[in-house]
Amino acid sequence: MSGTLHLLRPDLRDFTAYHAASPRRGVVRLHANEASWRADWDETDDGLNRYPDPRPEALVHALAALYGVVPGSVLVTRGSDDAIDLLVRAFCVAGEDAVLVTPPTFGMYAVAARLQGAGVVAVPLQRDFSLDTAGVLAATRAHVKLVFLCSPNNPTGSLVSPRAVDTLCRELHGRAVVVVDEAYVEFSRHPGFADRLARYPNLVLLRTLSKAWGLAGARVGTLLAEPELVAVLRALAPPYPLPSLATEAALRRLQPAELAATRRRTAAVVRRREALAEALQALPAVRRAWPSEGNFLLVRFADAAAAMAACEAAGVLVRDFSRQPGLSGCLRITVGTAAENRKLLRALARLEGKMVNARG
Ligand SMILES: *Cc1c(COP(=O)(O)O)cnc(C)c1O
C-alpha cells in the first residue's frame, strides 16, 4: 500500500462503489431506465436522454495529455470545488480530523472542511505572502490529514516555492496529503508541480478549465495524483462525474486549434495584467498592487470602501478582501479586456479627484 491510502477514513476502506450503468452505445439500452426518445432540439452526440459515460475516456486522455501525466493519474471532477469536497470527505473523519490552510487563501478548503465536520488549522502566510514551511510542518499533527496549498494563490497571486512543496511532501510522507491547487498556473511563469507526481505518493494537484480555458460554466476540474489513489477516489466520487454537455464542451475546447488560441489569449491576459498593475500603481489612491502570477491583482487602497463604491457606481464588480486578516484596504481585481480595464481605471481616477477636492 502506498504511503497515502492508509490515511483514508477507516470506515471507507472496504467501500463499494455505486455500479454505474454501462455507457455502451449502438446496442439496445434497456438497463438504465432511460427515456427512449430525445428532444428534437438536442444536438449532443449521444443524446441527453442517455446517462453520460461514467469515465469519459476521450476527455481523460485529452486532460492527461494537457497536464503531462498518465491517464491513470486523472480524475475528472465537477470543477475543483468538487475535488476539494471529495478529498475532505475521503480523508477526514468528522469530529476528529482536520485540514490545514494557509490564509489568506481560497475559501473553499475551509468551507468543505466545515461541511464534513472536520477541523481547520490555519498557518498564515508570511508578510511577503510566502509559505511558512516550518510553521506548516509544526502544525501538521496526527489529526491533520490534508494540507491545502494554492499556487498561484488566490487572492495574493503569490507562488508556493518548489522547495517548500518538496520539503512538505517528503516530511509529511505517510502522515498527510499535500494538495496544491493550481487553478491559475497557466498564467504563471512556473510550470506547476505535475512533474513531481511520480515522486510523491502524497501529492495531489488540482487543475481546472474554469480560468485560463474559459469554461467556468461547464464545471470541469481535474484531480491529479498517483493512479492508486485516483482509483480509490474515483470509487468514492459521484458515479457520473460530468454531464454530457460539459464533456462535449471540454473536448471541443481541447482541440489542437483551440489549444493554440488559448495559449495566445493567456499570454495576452498576462500582458494586460502587467499593464494594469502599472497603471493602478500610478494612482495616488493605490497604496500597492502586488505582483501576481494569476489573472487577477491584489490591490491595497488608501480607502477600500471608497474604491469599492467608485467601482460599483461605474458598474464594475471587484472583490472586497479588506476584512480578511492581513488584507486591510485590499480588493481583488480580475484582469479584464483592455476596455474593461480602462473603465476600471477611469472609475478609480474619479475617486482620486474627489479625495483631492475633499482634502483641499
Ligand atoms: C477559481 C478557483 C478554482 C476553480 O474552481 P472550479 O470549481 O474548478 O471552478 C479553484 N481553486 C481556486 C484557488 C480558485 O480561485
Image (cartoon, rainbow, N blue to C red):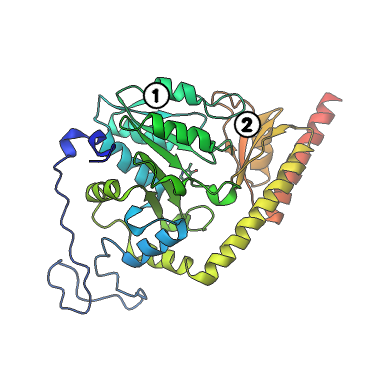
Dot 2 or dot 1: first in sequence order is 1
Residue 75 appears in the rendering? no
**Percent x, y of residue 336:** 64, 52
Tell me residue 315's x, y (percent). 64, 47
Nearest the eye: 51 or 133:
133
- Coordinates of residue 301 in the picture (x, y in percent): 69, 31
Quarter in which the N terminus is drawn: top left
In this view, 277 is above or below 72: above
Q: Which residue is located at x 42 percent, y 24 percent?
A: 137
Return the residue nearer the eye: 238 or 191: 191
Residue 121 tag number: 1
Between the residue at mark 2 and the residue at mark 1, the CA separation in whole angstroms equals: 24 Å
Q: Quadrant of residue 200?
A: top left
Q: Is residue 249 left or right of residue 115?
A: right
Q: Vertically, is 234 above or below 139?
A: below
The residue that disc 2 covers is: 330
Identify the residue shown where x is 71% and y is 42%: 277
Nearest to viewer (mark 2 / mark 1): 1
Q: Quadrant of residue 92?
A: top left
Q: Amino acid at mark 2?
A: Cys
